[in-house]
Amino acid sequence: MKSVPYFFMDVSKSQLNISHLKMICVLEQFDTVKEAAQALFITQPALTNRIREAERRLNTKLFIRRGRKIVMSNAGKRLVISAKKILEELARAEHDINRLTDGVERVMRVGLPHYASFSWLPSVVRVFKEEMPEVEIEISAESAIKPLNALYNGDIDVAMIATSQPQLVLDENLYQVEFLLRDELLACVSHSHQFADSEYLEADDFAEETYVTNSTVPETDREYELFFKPNNIIPSKVLQVGFNEAIMELIEAGMGVSIFSQRQLNKLIENRKVKTVRLGQTGLAIYWHVVSIKQETVAKATALLSSTIRGQLN
């Protein structure tokens, strides 16, 4: 079996600077150089010269002109992918360095899905302030769809993941997994809804309903994979609303139904004319886990996070 040669990238030979990367990211958002120049707070000739300079350094066209409009070439599209990652990582590094000047040695980024409960957060912040003041907790929702990818790429340090099974099996050499608790997915309807007095609901019951959700992208081990898909059911209308409070307002007004985890609903439905109904005759359980990359630098903080959350929610 032939070995694959290791490709070493000499960063000292990079042809572009931060100004070029910012330029390509802004130009992606606009149709004309004039609009992009205004967004960058520079003159149109200055931006045109910057584009030409980048193209000269790379010896390729980044944009194609069509009248007054510009269209990104394949080379430009490839560059913008890396430019976004580099600028995001630079912003993250600057953020962390600012924390260092405030006495924080490390920021622990915790990735959570959209449907997570946050009732434990104040206790976690207090406990870390007392027991690990050198670590600052930062909550991230950017990893909601693919949390393990975010962990692997270093975008987050810890992920809270819900699965359909009590045990989450991952590569033991790479990930550290701690079970947190059992939860349950529940339908949420107004008091006046026809389902309000039902003992439980089947997937067929949602076929003619307006389903209100905060994400139309199916998340793993949630209602689409566990409830709708196995029964070949999709609600007749799906309404995306980005805020849980807004979803509750629509449900309370009888303008749709939704599904949340029980832990999340404990706070959301307080003082509201809303009822919860089980999914399926035996209910639809999910199980929460805390997952981190297996590293000594995060092991102690992850253990403290897990024990604090478990103490609050159990």
Image: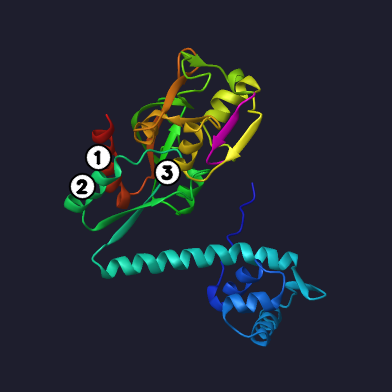
Mark earlier in primary sequence (2, 1): 2
Characterize the local packing of mark 1: few (<14), some (14-19) or many (20 or more) Cα atoms within 10 angstroms.
some
x and y percentages locating residue 110 in the rendered image? 38, 48
Q: Residue furthest right?
A: 67
Q: Circle 3 is placed at which residue position?
A: 112
Q: Which residues are magenta?
A: 208-215
Residue type (three-letter) at the residue carrying disc 3? Leu
Mark before the other along the chain sequence, 2 or 3: 3
In the picture shown, does residue 229 fall above or below 51? above
Residue 174 appears at what percent x and percent y? 43, 43
Here the colouring is rainbow
| Above or below 44: residue 160 | above
Q: CA distance from mark 2 to mark 1?
A: 8 Å
| 163 in relation to 15, above or below | above
The residue nearer to you, when weighing 100 against 284, is 284
Q: Is residue 165 shown left or right of residue 100? A: right
**Mark number for residue 308?**
1
